[in-house]
């Protein structure tokens, strides 16, 4: 049996604001932006070169969802962005205004630094030291 995670939903204030941030600041690709009923859209973004997992940008509907924007995990790192070159990407993100919450550090598993996206979600930017297991 083969299974994969196709996408992870990320609650955002508006589609266009989220598309702008993820494509212009983080450099993600806009994979799909399809209108749906009731004004909703199916919006998928992904880092360049990502083959399987996408982020579904889900515009908040109602107070309960709006209150969770940027805090879907109670303040814990939510998303993990692997890179093949940490020291190429880190200064680019800093120059684009990405808010890093710590200085980069070397761990046994990766070079890593936590950043916060414009909506408050915490991410790890990391370059793993070992190839992913197949």
Image (cartoon, helix red, strand yellow):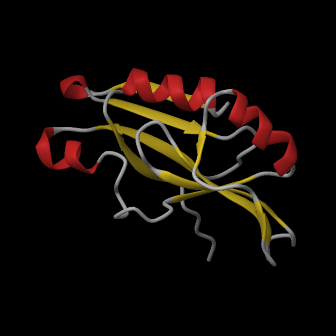
Residue 33 % position (x, y): 46, 25
Q: Quadrant of residue 99?
A: top right
Tell me what residue is drawn at x 45 percent, y 65 percent: 76
Q: Is residue 5 visible?
A: yes
Residue 62 relative to residue 96: left or right: left
Tell me what residue is drawn at x 50 percent, y 36 percent: 44
Say above or below: 122 vs 129: above
In this view, which residue lies farthest toward the left? Answer: 63
Pick the residue in front: 81 or 71. 71
Residue 49 relative to residue 46: left or right: right
Tell me the quadrant of the picture where the C terminus can be found: bottom right
Tell me what residue is drawn at x 71 percent, y 48 percent: 51
Residue 48 % position (x, y): 73, 37
Tell me the quadrant of the picture where the N terminus can be found: bottom right
Residue 82 relative to residue 46: left or right: right
Say above or below: 97 vs 102: above
Residue 11 relative to residue 37: left or right: right
Q: Is residue 134 visible?
A: no
Pick the residue in front: 53 or 70. 70
Residue 108 % position (x, y): 81, 78
Residue 107 % position (x, y): 78, 73
In this view, which residue lies farthest toward the front? Answer: 103
Tell me what residue is drawn at x 85 percent, y 52 percent: 84
Say above or below: 109 vs 50: below
């Amino acid at each position: 049996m083969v299974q994969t995670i196709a996408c992870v939903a990320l609650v955002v204030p508006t589609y266009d604001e989220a598309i702008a941030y993820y494509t212009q600041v983080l450099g993600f690709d806009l994979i799909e932006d399809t209108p749906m009923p009731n004004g909703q859209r199916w919006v998928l973004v992904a880092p360049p070169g990502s083959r399987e997992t996408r982020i579904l940008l889900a515009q908040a509907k109602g107070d309960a969802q709006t209150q969770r924007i940027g805090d879907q995990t109670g303040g814990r790192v939510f998303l993990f962005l692997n890179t093949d070159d940490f020291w190429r990407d880190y200064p680019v993100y800093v120059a684009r205004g990405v808010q890093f919450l710590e200085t980069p550090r070397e761990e046994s598993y990766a070079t890593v630094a936590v950043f916060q996206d414009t909506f408050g979600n915490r991410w790890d930017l990391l370059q793993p030291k070992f190839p992913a297991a197949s």
